[in-house]
Image (cartoon, grey):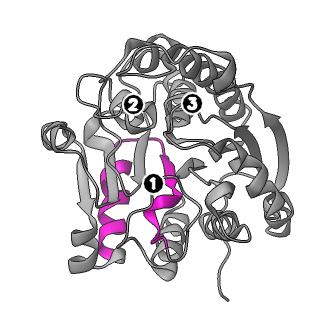
Amino acid sequence: MRSHSTIAIIGAPLDLGAGRRGVDMGPSALRLAGLNASLNSLGYAVEDLGNVSVAQQESVPAGPENAKYLPQIAKTCTKLAHLVRDAVVAGHLPLVLGGDHSVAAGTVAGVASAFRQRGESIGLIWIDAHADMNTPESSPSGNVHGMPLACCIGRGPVELTHILDYAPKVAPKNVVLIGIRDVDESEGRQVRCSGVTVFTMRDVDERGLRAVMTDAIRIAGDGTAGIHLSLDMDSVDPDEAPGVGTPVRGGMTYREAHLAMEILSDSDRMVSMEVVEVNPVLDSRNRTALLGVELVMSAMGKRIL
């Protein structure tokens, strides 16, 4: 049975956390690919809240080399967190369109805060080619889009870990990372001691996506009110999703990505979702955004029959 009848779409055209430009056009690309009409066709009411405001790289200083544009990213993520929290409180399912993956610090803060007000917690499924668990001390690039998952479990710059004034947003025991295949050496050490459950692409290859997703939903859902899905489009193999800033060969196939969304939809545990890292500048005929819309549709209940 469908838990939500209204989807609140929020664009977060943030590119300050990424090393390559163009991802700020991701929300527009996803909307251009027919997202709103597609969700309407499934019977949802769609409330498009537009885009949260974002500073432009050319108009602000980069700041510290180990966490570039941190104040500006934190400001945008805080605005996003308030919008997301309001959507959850109103009984809607927030769907955030990135932007780079640093927006997740705001999305997760907003969802978690809304449930915290009810005395409840959330789980988190993070599907990505990268672990996104660097901190300013470990990051080789200083790009904040490599840090948001660490921030969600309370590790990293206080400007992001304590959005809405508390941390962590999610208990590590309820966080599952799926599909990683490109991890920095120092970051890997942090992942291993974090308490987060990790299914690498080797796990997907050996066990199959169905078994991985079944375990992920069980872990993220254990004792929680619901699950937030953070979907980085670079989790899909670049043959299918070329328009991403940090492509890595050997990702999920087209059907594996759809199966992941379908299994999560079947569980009826998803309370919020974000799709990030769509970069139209690097894409071909908006293929990656079109695939992103297809995957959202599968996550929201579309079936083959």
Number of numbered labels in the structure image: 3
Q: Nearer the viewer, residue 3 or 275?
A: 275
Left or right: where 151 falls relative to 163: left
The quadrant of the image that shows the C terminus is: bottom right
Whether pointer 2 and pointer 3 mark residues with C-beta atoms closer than 8 Å, the reply is no
Closest to the camera, between mark 2 and mark 3, is 3
Q: Earlier in the sequence, mark 1 or mark 3?
A: 3
Outermost residue toward the front in this view: 58
Amino acid at pointer 3: Leu
Which region shows up in magenta?
211-238
Q: Where is residue 5 drawn, in percent x and y?
A: 77, 53
Q: Which residue is mark 1?
A: 246
Report, in whole angstroms, how far the alpha carbon at label 2 lies from the one at label 1. 21 Å
The quadrant of the picture occupied by the N terminus is bottom right
Type of residue at label 2? Answer: Cys
- The x, y position of residue 43, in whole percent, is 83, 65
Q: Is residue 98 visible?
A: no
Secondary structure under the numbered disc 3 in the rendered image: loop
Report the Cα–Cα distance between label 1 and label 3: 15 Å
Tell me where residue 121 sits by quadrant: top left
Please name the residue that numbered disc 3 is placed on.
16
Residue occupying the point 30% across, 68% down: 212
Marks 2 and 1, the one that precedes in the sequence: 2
The spot of residue 267 in percent (x, y) is: 49, 64
Q: Is residue 52 magenta?
A: no
Q: Name the residue: 74% across, 71% down.
A: 285
